[in-house]
Amino acid sequence: MRKTLLSLAVVGALSISANAFTLGELGNFEFKKANQNVFILHGPPMEPNVENEGFMNNPAVIEAEHGLIMIDPGGNYNVGKKIFAELEKVTKKPIIAIIDTHKHGDHWFANKLMKEKYPNVKIYALEKMIEASKAGEAEKWYGILERLSKNLKGTKEFEYPTISIKNGDKLEIDGQTFFIHSPKRAHTDTDVLIIHAESKTLFLGDNLMKLRLGGFDDSSSILGNIKLLEEIKSAPELNLYVPGHGPSGKMNEAIDPFLDYMKLLLEGAKKALDEDIEAYEMKPEVVKTMKEYQNWDAFNGQMGKHLQKALDELEALEE
Ligand SMILES: [Zn+2]
């Protein structure tokens, strides 16, 4: 009898873990209540790779009376299935709307899976995000994510957003209110930041990251990103700040690390400009000021490029 009970317990434990969303050694991932009616599945803050299956962003849902509003559903169709399975453990209400924060595919390629589950879902993004994605950005990101995660093959039909939103918009969806802010150029030139009014949650997309550094692409502006985060910090404090990658938190704990990192880049770039030296010559001195970032994912691969970009932006201002 004892043996039977024991084996039942083992089977039970196995079936629970078989249902969990596990990524190799990275552990289990699940939607957790982050604030009021806001649930977030925080992905591992790292570059896309085979182990994380291309899942490393922070899909979130706001539970409304009849349905769900989802923000950044995930990085590909296959992880979308796992994200959806986790979501169903929290609520089986239908997804009625999706808002994509920007053009990078690691945030929105799972639109395809969500749309397959709920064909009536309305998908929102900035007009420029939709245009840029269709004009080649989606294709480019498919290549990047497939190369790094090997998890996209056969999923190349993109589910583009179809409803364009703009800076200053107020969306009322199933009794929930969202304010849209779109900076001209920050993480990219296609970003929307979303305030969920009822819970006082701000979704910053990749204008904020923690424990991981991503790229600043050609459409981005480090100066614009700094300005944006400073504006957010000078506004009345909200309850929760959600980055595109890494843990959410209160205003200062969430925003300061990334903002301070960019300010250190800028300081280094200014000094390089004053001393008329190249970014790579300046780099060792700047690295010394960045002790707390050296264990952030992709620090070694990204920091030098970021310093160069900051310097390029300062030089462009002088022209
Ligand atoms: Zn991004």
Image (cartoon, rainbow, N blue to C red):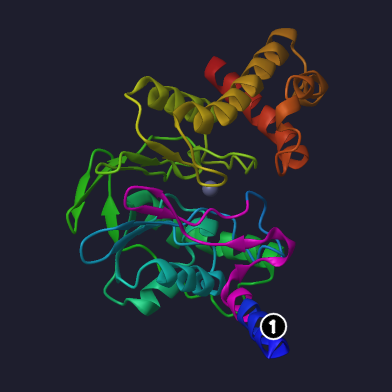
* Helix, strand or loop under label 1: helix
Quadrant (top left, top right, bottom left, bottom right) of the C terminus: top right
Q: Which residues are magenta?
A: 15-44
**Kind of residue sitting beneath label 1:** Leu
Residue extending furthest front?
1
Q: Residue at x 66, y 58 (%)?
A: 48
Q: Is mark 1 within 8 Å of ligand 1?
A: no
Left or right: where 169 falls relative to 232: left
Identify the image quadrant of residue 282.
Answer: top right
In the depicted structure, whether residue 97 falls above or below residue 177? below
Left or right: where 15 falls relative to 250: right
Q: Residue at x 43, y 28 (%)?
A: 228
How many numbered dots are placed on residues in this image? 1
In the depicted structure, whether residue 240 falls above or below residue 102? above
Identify the image quadrant of residue 304.
Answer: top right
Identify the image quadrant of residue 313.
Answer: top right
Residue beneath disc 1: 6
Left or right: where 273 falls relative to 121: right
Q: Position of residue 131 (x, y in %)?
A: 39, 56
In the depicted structure, whether residue 216 falls above or below residue 99? above
Q: Residue at x 51, y 43 (%)?
A: 206
Identify which residue, 186 or 239, lies in the foreground: 239
Q: Position of residue 15 (x, y in %)?
A: 60, 81
Quadrant (top left, top right, bottom left, bottom right) of the N terminus: bottom right
Callout 1: few (<14), some (14-19), or many (20+) C-alpha neighbours within 10 Å?
few
Q: Position of residue 52 (x, y in %)?
A: 66, 62
* Magenta stretch: includes residue 142: no
* Magenta stretch: includes residue 25: yes
